[in-house]
Amino acid sequence: MSTPTGQIPSLEDTTPTNLRPLKRALISVYDKTGITELASTLHGAGIEIVSTGSTAATIENSGTPITAVEELTGFPECLGGRVKTLHPRIHAGILADRTRIEHVRELADLGIAGFDLVVCNLYPFAATVASGADYNQCIEQIDIGGPTMVRAAAKNHATVAIVTNPADYPKVNSAIENGGFTADQRRALAAAAFAHTASYDAAVATWFTTQTQTDTRTPSFLAGSWEQTAQLRYGENPHQGAAVYQTNGTGLARQTPATGIATAKQLHGKPMSYNNYTDGDAALRAAYDHDDPCVAIIKHANPCGIAIGEDVAQAHRHAHACDPVSAFGGVIAVNRPVSVELAQQIAPIFTEVVLAPAYEPGALEVLQSKKNLRVLEVEPPVEGGVEFKQISGGIVLQTRDSIDADGDATQKWELVSGEVADPQTLRDLEFAWRSVRAVRSNAILLAKDGASIGVGMGQVNRVDSCRLAIERANTLGGRSTGDAAANQETTTAGGARNTTSENPPRRSEGAVAASDAFFPFADGVQLLIDAGVKAVVQPGGSIRDEEVIAAAQAAGITMYFTGTRHFSH
């Protein structure tokens, strides 16, 4: 260990200056990424280093001399490391504003040297909670001395620079070369430091609240923090400002997915827009609602088509065939790597965004031939957690709607009309029930052979949603991406698109239907019956269930009640 060499400040130090040279640094970090290199640079520049515990050992073992905190304070670390920096010789050195004569005189009277740089980051509390650690282990990861040093240095940014992120260590190197940090640089570092401790406190406060409640899904106190990752050109409309923020995995955000479109890597194309992000998120969730290879095509937050298949190329053909007109300018999400065949199918169709977990060799090159197509590599969104929406004066929060149509759940469905569905019909009903969650209420989805064929969404009554789903199935669908003639488009003098298709099939015949909520009257079910639908899955629960069931029984169609609903507003 080296001998303390910190100089007691003199009155000359009070001279106001934008640039303050670095003479003495305090380093205490949990994340030791890059710390030995930083310490070596500081020592090489003649800057004294004061350090604590394991940080001091790490730096010393790398060959860089330091002054241990206990040498400075004359008091050893105690209580298993809980107390080591909470001492006037540390905090007076951090908090003294050396532009003020009275502070400088007091430091001189006390024989305390000031710090010009504090490098500190905190215990991994959020990661410890997320790991499933027990209560006492989580408690031990509540940092006390670290946040105190960080906040003290940030408050006193007039004379102290605070660095909390290893990614900012190059800024220290530049400051050494330039004679110190400027006032603006210190202020920016202080802002980042307060964000660091605020995020940390949010994690601790929210976790602690959940420890005092029986229902931890909706804690009585909520806190969260997000970091801006991209500034967008505008929001939903050009007059609205917009940006993208990523959860840092703490507080309220700790309970929400930390993977998904906000963490996606863009591989090609124009910058993402606000609407690209919202539609992309809806597409991702729709695609990952299915275990089989699935493609979801979304536009304005609603599906133009969802389908599963033996591979993603087949799934895309069937999804696109649901509504090729609306798929123009849509967003495509895939729950498997994109194959060359799929990329070749997508390329001729005007598409805004493609999202997938990976791209097979050659597939990305095909998509990159489209200059403006945004191509994203994205991890699957994590199921579970909570979601919230802003309302005037606050937010509303709910647990996420987890899909319940797996093999076990279908066994719990109640057969209220007709014969037990054969295996293929049951698979289609399950597919429809999984897919209808992606449709805005009121929602009706018609499906056949693992693909949506007609979608009725966003209507203010269910009978209109039924009518719309049937109409779209029988007038818009049936055009496969593999059929060039069926995809032929013409343009009118006014610029509108016309798609040509002679004698479109009545695809609703023999299809199944899913309704996100109960049928309040029998009229909606009757429309489906008249369109040739052979089986329906719906939550049930209407005061007129008997009328609805009677209509299904009179027509001889199969109907299941799930007992749960999938409203999505």
Image (spheres, rainbow, N blue to C red):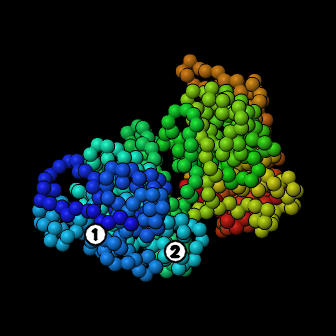
Give above or below for 80 relative to 20: below
Of helix, strand and loop, which one carries label 2? helix
Which label belongs to residue 518?
none
The answer to whether 484 appears left or right of 141 in the picture is right
Task: State the CA–CA distance, disc 2 to disc 1.
Answer: 27 Å
Q: Is 539 on the left or on the right of 422, as rendered?
A: left
Q: Nearer the viewer, residue 412 or 556?
A: 412
Q: Residue at x 78, y 42 (%)?
A: 311
Three-letter code, disc 2: Cys
The x, y position of residue 5, in whole percent, is 27, 62
Quarter of the image holding residue 129? bottom right
Q: Position of residue 167 (x, y in %)?
A: 44, 50
Q: Is residue 343 above or below residue 539?
A: above
Residue at the (29%, 43%) spot, across then down? 178
The residue carrying pointer 1 sits among few (fewer than 14), some (14 to 19) or many (20 or more) residues within 10 Å by Cα, namely some
Single out the residue that lies furthest toward the top.
493
Q: Can residue 471 be seen in this snapshot? A: no
Quadrant where the N terminus is found in the figure: bottom left
Q: Which residue is mark 2?
A: 138
Judge depth for marks 2 and 1 and give the one in front.
Answer: 1
Q: Which residue is mark 1?
A: 91
